């Protein structure tokens, strides 16, 4: 990578980081608050009645799922909102004109999305310490699934942002795809507690493997093998990255 191109990549990455950091109260603080409200409500209602994996109290079980949910949703929101805003306002041209390759374009948006997701997730974990102390037993697994999950949703956000032509379409993508897949991925329950049919259906949801693998990093137990989760997550990331790069390389809905 030449010095000029590296400079362009750094500038685009800085622009994306600055975009959400300048309004961090909204992009980081608000998601942390809303996620902690889930923890407060569900823990208050169900903690005295539910244990998971034998002896893990329900509040502790909730924390990794909520942290990962925050990472995924905010990684998606970052790249998707940035692209749709740039397209609607017309300033996408200033991103496309400089000599930045589509791979650098992709890397800058996804890295910024991962970082926003990580910051929100870390904020949720810190806030959860008020209610229960949950420390990772296998930090490397936690880091791996955090980065992979953030990259996957950052890529999905780019796909949605490129495809959508107005905010309504982007909202539909988020409300009818991202939100259901996230909420039905075992954030609030173990899939082993589901009836046989829904237990089987859950295994076709790639978000389940991101959350289950991430939870394994905290408790050392999970619904499926973390290696299986890692394999499926890696394949999913590779497919989405290839699709996003293909859309960028062709200029689909970006270049007139």
Image: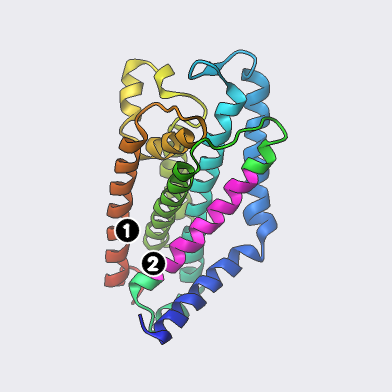
Q: Secondary structure at mark 1?
A: helix
Residue 36 vertical placement versus 81 (above, below):
above
Q: Do callouts 1 and 2 mark residues in contact (Cβ within 8 Å)?
A: yes
In the image, residue 170 above or below residue 45: below
Identity of the residue drawn at 47% across and 62% down? 111
The quadrant of the picture occupied by the C terminus is bottom left
Q: Position of residue 84 (x, y in %)?
A: 47, 64
Q: For the image shown, how many numbered marks are present on the structure?
A: 2
**Mark 2 lies on residue:** 106
95 in relation to 44, above or below: below
Residue at far bottom of view: 4
Q: Mark 1 = which residue? A: 241
Between 222 and 16, the one nearer to me in the picture: 222
Q: Give the magenta part as a residue range.
A: 105-124
Indicate yes or no whether the magenta region holds residue 171: no
- Percent x, y of residue 25: 70, 56
Q: Position of residue 15 (x, y in %)?
A: 55, 73
Query: Does label 1 or label 2 sit earlier along the sequence?
Result: 2
The crowding category of the residue bearing disc 1, from other C-alpha atoms within 10 Å (few below 14, some 14 to 19, many at least 20), is many
Residue 128 left/right relative to 165? right
In the picture as drawn, the residue positioned furthest to the right comes out as: 130
Specify whether residue 134 is in view: yes
Q: Main secondary structure of the magenta part?
A: helix
Q: Residue at position x 43%, y 47% from top?
A: 144
Task: Specify the farthest residue to the top.
Answer: 49
Can residue 91 be seen in the rendering of this structure?
no
Mark 1 and mark 2: span between their CA atoms? 8 Å
Left or right of residue 40, residue 194 in this image: left
Residue 100 relative to residue 132: left or right: left
Vertical order, 47 against 134 (above or below) = above
Residue 177 x, y percent position in the rendering:
40, 43
Tell me if 137 is positioned left or right of 158 in this view. right
């Amino acid at each position: 990578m030449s010095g000029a191109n590296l400079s362009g990549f750094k500038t685009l990455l800085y622009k994306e980081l600055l975009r959400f950091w300048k309004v961090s109260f909204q992009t980081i603080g608000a998601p942390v608050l809303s996620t902690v409200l889930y923890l407060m409500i569900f823990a208050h209602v169900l903690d005295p009645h539910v244990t998971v994996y034998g002896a893990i109290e329900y509040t502790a079980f909730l924390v990794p799922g909520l942290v990962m949910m925050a990472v995924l949703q905010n990684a998606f929101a970052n790249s998707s909102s940035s692209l749709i805003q740039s397209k609607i306002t017309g300033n996408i041209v200033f991103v496309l004109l400089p000599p930045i390759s589509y791979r650098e374009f992709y890397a800058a948006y996804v890295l910024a999305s991962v970082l926003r997701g990580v910051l929100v997730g870390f904020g949720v974990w810190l806030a959860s310490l008020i209610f229960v102390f949950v420390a990772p037993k296998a930090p490397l697994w936690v880091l791996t699934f955090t980065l992979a999950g953030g990259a996957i949703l950052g890529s999905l956000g780019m796909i949605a942002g490129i495809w959508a032509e107005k905010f309504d379409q982007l909202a539909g993508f988020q409300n009818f795809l991202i939100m259901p897949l996230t909420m039905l991925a075992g954030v609030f329950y173990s899939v082993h507690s589901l009836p046989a049919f829904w237990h089987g259906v859950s295994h076709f949801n790639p978000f389940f493997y991101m959350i289950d693998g991430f939870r394994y990093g905290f408790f050392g137990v999970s619904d499926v093998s973390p290696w299986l989760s890692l394999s499926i997550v890696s394949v999913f990331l590779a497919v989405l990255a290839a699709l996003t790069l293909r859309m960028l390389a062709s200029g689909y809905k970006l270049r007139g």
